Amino acid sequence: MNKFCKSLLVSCLLILSQHVLAEDLLEGVEIRKTFKGSAIDSASPASFNISGGSGSDTYHNIDLAIKIKEHEFDFDRQGVWRGRMYPTVEFHKNSDENNESENAQAALSFEFERGLGSCAQDKSPFCTSMFWDAAFKVKRDSHNDKTTQNVSLFATYSKAGKGGSYGPNSIIVFGDEALKLIYLPLLGFEYHRNLPIEEKVDGEKVEVAGAVDEYFAVARLNLGITPFAKALDEKLKLVVDYSFRSTLGSNDLIDDSNAFIDVSLDFYLDEKDRLAFGFNYSHGKSPSRNFLDEEKWGIGFKFKL
């Protein structure tokens, strides 16, 4: 492990070791691998991985996303309509010589809920709700010297709760806590402006178009799985995020339909589930990779707040 790997790992451990001070300073802040959609998604922890895939040698991969404290607001006195706003920043770097990438992203997200039914326990209108997520993102791609804008809107039906519900965003328990499952389907659309399109040519990633503007209809399925929940004290987590995009315009550089899957399996090492060792796997095409079709895996340390 080189000096950079050791320095990053030590930094993570130092951050996680600061209890009272860190919790006060970072109250309301979340750290994850990425914030792809709504705040109620299951999200993988931030990671520093030794990675590989698509016939390349191993390399370093960094995925870090920070969500700033939410600002909540009501739309009516009854509290049936509610919303929140929050900014996020992300940094992603891939050191593969044939597939090098580095980009930073800033986003502003707005979420809206319409309560449809109350909980038996606390009478909250948000056990059952319709949920909308709108976001505006700006990404700076240093490798391709491009700045891309993205607008998205997603909707889902949420039935949060623990008591025997099998609806979206509910915690479903199988057996004697042998497995816990939470799932969330989302439907929506995305608009990408000034997006580079890339392909592999002779084993190397190249930009095949200066930039494109395109609309997509998107279907996503987000899964959070806790296998052997009782036996392992919920330390083992599996997060699966699948997305399917269909172009709404006509562009010869992008396939009419594109699928992408991202899987993270992590075992948490500390009492508060902040530091983990885990495995990542992804395959397919997505705008986050400029629609480059490739397969990636990674193994390494991860952390979250």
Image: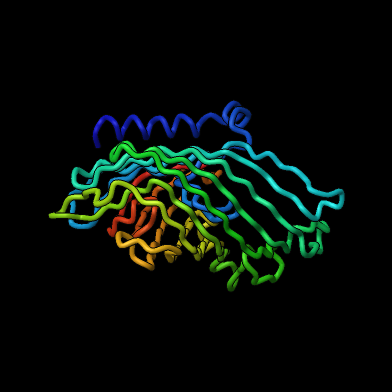
Q: Does the image show residue 238?
A: no
Residue at the left extreme, as displayed: 202
Colour scheme shown:
rainbow
Indicate the quadrant where residue 94 lies. top left
Q: Position of residue 232 (x, y in %)?
A: 50, 58
Q: Residue at x 30, y 52 (%)?
A: 197
* Residue in the image at 52% along x and 59% along y: 189
Relative to 45, residue 261 above or below: below
Q: Could you say which quadrant of the image residue 294 lies in?
A: bottom left
Q: Which one is nearer the viewer's eye here, 293 or 195?
A: 195
Where 140 sits versus 246, above or below? above
Place of residue 266 in the rendered image (x, y in percent of width and height, measured from the top left) = 43, 53
Residue 30: % across, % down = 55, 40
In the foreground, 17 or 67: 67
Q: Residue at x 42, y 40 (%)?
A: 139
- Single out the residue that lies furthest toward the front: 250
Left or right, 111 with reference to 98: right
Query: Foreground: 169 or 78?
Result: 78
Q: Quadrant of the C terminus?
A: top right
Q: How many marks?
A: 0
Q: Quadrant of the N terminus?
A: top left
Placement of 4 over or under 238, stated as above or below: above
Q: Is residue 68 left or right of residue 82?
A: left
Does residue 121 show up?
yes
* Nearer-the-camera pick, 16 or 36: 36
Provide residue 5's location: percent of width, then percent of height.
30, 35
Residue 29 left/right relative to 115: left
